[in-house]
C-alpha cells in the first residue's frame, strides 16, 4: 500500500509539473492599439490571430482604450503587466508618455515593441513601420497631385491626434518633400483625434473657412472616411476630393461616389501578423531585435531592422475603381 501510495503521489507530482510546464510555455502577447472600434486595428488583430494560430501556443490579447489617449494606453499596459504577458506590441498615442510604463514592463522581462505608431527608442526594442516614412509622405503628396487639375492647387491635411507619432512623421515628410511638388500649396493642418465625429466636424470647418481647398489628405483611416462623408453630404463631389490612407472596405463608397479617385494603404492584416511574429521571435530568444538583425516573419519573409532600430514592412499600395471591389471584401 505504501508503495502504491508513493507511486500515486509521484504520478500526481509528474502530471502537475507537466501541466505547469505547458502553461509556462504558452506565450501571451498584448496587442495594444490606439483605440478599440477602429477598422484598421480590427484588421490588424485578424492578422495577429492568424499568426498566433500558425505559431501555436500563442495567445494574442487584443486590447486598447476606448479613446485615443496616452493615459488610456498606460492603464492597458499596466493591466497587461499584471497579467504577466510575455510581450507587448503597441501602436502608440504618444511616443514619450508611454515610456515609463513600458520600461516597467521590460524590467519584468516582457519584450516590448511598437508598431504602426512608434514609441521613443528607450521604451521599446524596435519599431515596426508599415512602410518607410519617406515613401508614405511621397505617396500622400502624389495622391494629392493626382486629384488636382494640372497637379496644382490648395490642399489641407486632416490628421489624428497632435501627439500621434506616425501621423506627425508622415506630415513632416510631406512638408519636406513639398519642394518636389511645386504646384501644391499646403494651407493648414487640423486634427480629428481619430474620432469619427470630431474628424467630420474638423473637415466641415476646414472647407467652410478655406473655400479654395480642392483636396483634403488624411493619413488616417478614420479621417479619410469622415472627410469623404463631408464632401458627399455637402454636395461637393467633383469640386473637392479626399485622399490619403484608408481601408478598402470603408472607402469603397467614397470611390463609387466620386468623393475620392484613389487612396493608399498597406495591408493592416499583414501588419498585425508581422508584429506578432516579431514579438514571438523575441520571446523565444530567436532574435534580439538589434539594428542589422533579420527577423523571420512567417509568410512575410524576413524583416530587417535598420540602423535606427526601425523596420519597414512594405510599400503603400494604391486602391481605385479598378481594384476596390476585389480588396473591399478582404479588409
Image (cartoon, rainbow, N blue to C red):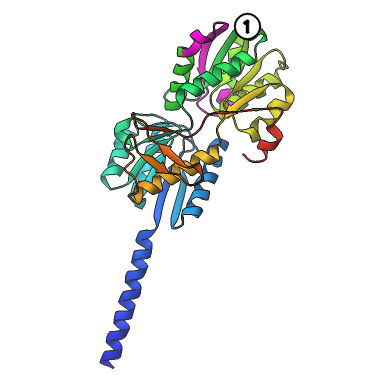
Q: Is residue 80 visible?
A: no
Count residues near mark 1 (Cα–Cα under 10 Å), then give few for <14, some for 14-19, many for 20+.
some
Q: x and y percent of residue 118 in the render?
A: 40, 31
| Quarter of the image where one finds residue 304 | top left
| Quarter of the image where one finds residue 197 | top right
Q: Is residue 327 visible?
A: yes
- The one nearer the camera, 270 or 299, is 299
Q: Is residue 330 left or right of residue 62?
A: right
Q: x and y percent of residue 86 in the render?
A: 36, 50
Examine the rendered structure and indicate whether residue 109 appears above or below residue 214: below
- The one nearer the camera, 102 or 180, is 180
Q: Is residue 219 left or right of residue 114?
A: right
Confirm whether the magenta stretch covers residue 188.
yes
Confirm whether the magenta stretch covers residue 120.
no
Examine the rendered structure and indicate whether residue 71 appears above or below residue 25: above
Question: Which range of residues does the magenta coloring cover?
Answer: 177-199
Can you say which quadrant of the picture contains the N terminus?
Answer: bottom left
Q: Which residue is labeled 1 in the image?
A: 212
Residue drawn at x 56%, y 13% is 156
Q: Is residue 74 left or right of residue 324?
A: left
Q: x and y percent of residue 93 in the render?
A: 42, 31
Residue drawn at x 60%, y 33% is 247
Amino acid at each position: 500500500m505504501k508503495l502504491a501510495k508513493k507511486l500515486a503521489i509521484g504520478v500526481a507530482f509528474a502530471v502537475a509539473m507537466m501541466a505547469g510546464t505547458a502553461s509556462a510555455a504558452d506565450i501571451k502577447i498584448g496587442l495594444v492599439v490606439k483605440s478599440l472600434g477602429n477598422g484598421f486595428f480590427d484588421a490588424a488583430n485578424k492578422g495577429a490571430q492568424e499568426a498566433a494560430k500558425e505559431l501555436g501556443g500563442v495567445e494574442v490579447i487584443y486590447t486598447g482604450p476606448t479613446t485615443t489617449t496616452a493615459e488610456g494606453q498606460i492603464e492597458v499596459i499596466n493591466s497587461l503587466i499584471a497579467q504577466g504577458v510575455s510581450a507587448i506590441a503597441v501602436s502608440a498615442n504618444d511616443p514619450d508618455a508611454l515610456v515609463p510604463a513600458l520600461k516597467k514592463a521590460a524590467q519584468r522581462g516582457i519584450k516590448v515593441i511598437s508598431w504602426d505608431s512608434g514609441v521613443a527608442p528607450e521604451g521599446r526594442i524596435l519599431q515596426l513601420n508599415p512602410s518607410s516614412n519617406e515613401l508614405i509622405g511621397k505617396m500622400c503628396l502624389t495622391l494629392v497631385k493626382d486629384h488636382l487639375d494640372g497637379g496644382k492647387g490648395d490642399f489641407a491635411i486632416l490628421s489624428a491626434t497632435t501627439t500621434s507619432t506616425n501621423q506627425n512623421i508622415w506630415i513632416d515628410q510631406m512638408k519636406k518633400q513639398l519642394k518636389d511638388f511645386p504646384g501644391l500649396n499646403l494651407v493648414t493642418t487640423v486634427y480629428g483625434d481619430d474620432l469619427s465625429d470630431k474628424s467630420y466636424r474638423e473637415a466641415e470647418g476646414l472647407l467652410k473657412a478655406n473655400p479654395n481647398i480642392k483636396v483634403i489628405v488624411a493619413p488616417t483611416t478614420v479621417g479619410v472616411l469622415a472627410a469623404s462623408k463631408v464632401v458627399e453630404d455637402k454636395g461637393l463631389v467633383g469640386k473637392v476630393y479626399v485622399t490619403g490612407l484608408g481601408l478598402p472596405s470603408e472607402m469603397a463608397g467614397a470611390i463609387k461616389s466620386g468623393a475620392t479617385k484613389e487612396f493608399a494603404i498597406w495591408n493592416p492584416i499583414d501588419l498585425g501578423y508581422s508584429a506578432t511574429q516579431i514579438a514571438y521571435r523575441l520571446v523565444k530568444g530567436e532574435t534580439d531585435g538589434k539594428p542589422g538583425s533579420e527577423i523571420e516573419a512567417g509568410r512575410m519573409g524576413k524583416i530587417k531592422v535598420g540602423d535606427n532600430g526601425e523596420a519597414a514592412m512594405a510599400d503603400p499600395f494604391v486602391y481605385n475603381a479598378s481594384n476596390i471591389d476585389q480588396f473591399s471584401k478582404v479588409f
